[in-house]
Structures are given as structure tokens and as C-alpha cells.
Image: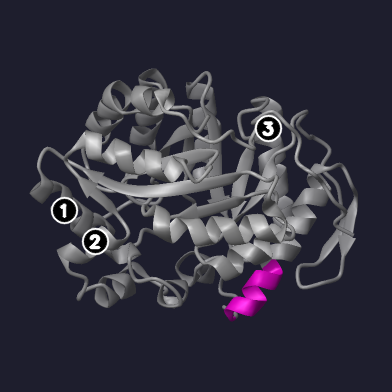
Amino acid sequence: MTLYSYHVSHEQIPPRDLLDLVRRAEEAGFDGAFSSDHFQPWAGVQGQSGFAWSWLGAAMQATQRLTFGIISVPGGWRYHPAVLAQAVATLGQMFPGRIPWIALGSGQAMNEHVVGAPWPGKAERNARLREGAEIMRALLAGETVTRHGRIPVSEARLWTRPETPTRLVGAATTPETAAWLGTWADGLLTVGTRPDALAPVVDAFRESGGADKPVFLKMDVSWAASAAEALHQAHAQWRFNQLGSPVSWELRSPAEFEAASRFVRPEDMHEAVLVSHDLTAMADRIAACAALGFDSIDLHQVGGHQAAFIDALGERVLPGLRRRKAPAANFDPFAAPVTGSGR
């Protein structure tokens, strides 16, 4: 059965308010929460950017059963992969089974350039992504790791490790990257709202080694009382995220995203955001995506009305989704991933 999580958008919502919202999501019947990890927002209008890793500990203490995930970058800019592995292991030890997977990506300049290091091209970032994931996987498996590659590590060992390992899932939005991830990642995270666009990405991952691995989806949605309001809030809050690659990889500040997105029209938002005031139509689209075999779907309300969104989905959408038949999931939150050496 597909699981459903509430998206924790640190770029848009203060961390204290997010604690209240994940408690509300748990009460409403969501299965989990999935966190962003930003140093700064996409645009000034969003106005926030709390530190996700300290927030996660508070959120897991504030809730009882929700599982948590996060997308982060192990390439050695803001985070060395050894430090990320320690963060994951510590959360897993304190809250057994409640951080079953995290997603790893190659990063964006807007978040990583702040440490003052050079920002390389995509091929180099992908190489650092894989190397960082290998280091994390080895440390989480209990190995002592020394490497002299792109990301140096010297005699690193995690002295505190969880009983239940955390899967290291790769993030991709194209079939080419998904196929590459299928050869080494513990699963796939992708983003979208249209089954016809998502299917090639999922198929590429499964055909390249990911057939028995879980697949996860983040869906950006904008729900409001009217269609006009839903479209307005999608454009006001999330047009900065619609620029696509390679532009979004290279911009370095909220001001640059604001300038680059000035020609994005409200009607353009339908391409990447599920904009609707109709919960039945929204449920039908979510179910169509779930039918592709996603093990978990993260629902990001990109506009306001967060509490109302949580309550409405908990009462009127999630129960019906769970009654629908869907392909059997590959994902057991408490099963150990395949691990490998980081040497």
C-alpha cells in the first residue's frame, strides 16, 4: 500500500510552526513527513529557511508514529558525508525505525555556494554525489572509512549507530539520471504530478537495477477554496521553482530566482503543480500516480492554508486513497537496505 507524507517546507514556514503542522498531520492520519534542507529560500516572499537537521530531532520527539525523511547533499560543500552519516545514525538511534530513508541529490548553488567553495559542473557533482553516498553507506554499516578521492575521509567510524539502517535514495527527474541511480542507489525519489511524465523516469530506474528497490514521489499541489485562489497562490509562492535544469542548479540567491522567474505566467504553473480546489479531482490524480507503483507519495501544499490542507486531506482524501487498489509496494520501512563498502 502506498504511504502518504506531509511535506515540511522550511523555505516557506517557520520551524516552530512546522512542529505544530507535523503534529496535526499525524493526528489527521498522514503516514510520515518529508523535509526540505535549504540554506536560503527560493525567493524573499517565502521568507524562511530553518536548519532542517536540528528541526528533525524536535519533530520526531513531538510526534509518536510518523516516519521522517529529508533530501540532502553529501557532496562535501555544506555537509561532509561523514557528518551527514552521523546525523542520520543519531536520529535513527534515538527514534528507531522512524527515519527509514533519506534522499541524496547533487545539489544547487543557491544552498551550497555559501561555504565559498567552487561550484563544479553537473558531471563532477554527480561523481561527488555517488562518492558521498558510498562513504555514508559504509559508515552506517559500521566500517572504518579512509578514502583519498574527491571527498577525503580519514579513519572515520560511527560509534553510535541505529539498529535499523536508513536507505540512501537518489533523487532524479530525468530517465537518464534515474537509470544511473538504478545501478547504485537504494531507491529513487522523483518529482512530478503527471503519470505520463513520471512513468519513463520510474521505468528507467527499474530497468537499470532498481526493479526490487522502492520508488518515492514528491507531488507539488496547490489547493484552495476556489480555482482562482489555488492558481494565484501557486504562482505567488512556487513559480521560482519552475525554472528547471540547468538554470535552477546555477542561480545563487533568492534575488536571482526572482529575476529569472519574472516571465513565468500563472497558467504555466499547471505544468509542474497540481492546482485544484476540487479534492476529488486531486485524489484521482494522486491515485493515478500511485498506480505507477510508488511506495510513498509526499504531498507539498505550495501555497498557504496548511492546517486546512492537512485536515481536508486527512478527512476527505487519504481514507479513499487507502481503499483503492494499488500495486504491492517494495518498501518495508523496517527492512535493512543492501549495504556496500566505502573503501
Report x, y in % for residue 224.
16, 40
Q: Quadrant of residue 107?
A: bottom right
**Near-viewer residue (63 or 102):** 102
Give the left or right position of residue 124, taking residue 259 as reference: right
Report x, y in % for residue 256.
32, 75
Q: Between marks 3 and 1, how big is the CA–CA gap?
A: 39 Å
Report x, y in % for residue 212.
70, 45
Amino acid type shown at disc 2? Met
Amino acid type shown at disc 1? Leu
Callout 1: few (<14), some (14-19), or many (20+) C-alpha neighbours within 10 Å? many
Residues in magenta, as a range:
121-128
Q: Assign a secondary structure to mark 3.
A: helix
Q: Is residue 325 above or below residue 248?
A: above
Callout 1–callout 2 Cβ contact below 8 Å? yes
Q: Name the mark on residue 231.
A: 1
Q: Earlier in the sequence, mark 1 or mark 2?
A: 1
* 328 in magenta: no
Q: Between marks 3 and 2, how big is the CA–CA gap?
A: 37 Å
Q: Is residue 125 visible?
A: yes
Residue beneath disc 2: 269
Give the left or right position of residue 209, taking residue 236 as reference: right
Q: Assign a secondary structure to mark 2.
A: helix
Give the left or right position of residue 106, taking residue 316 as reference: right
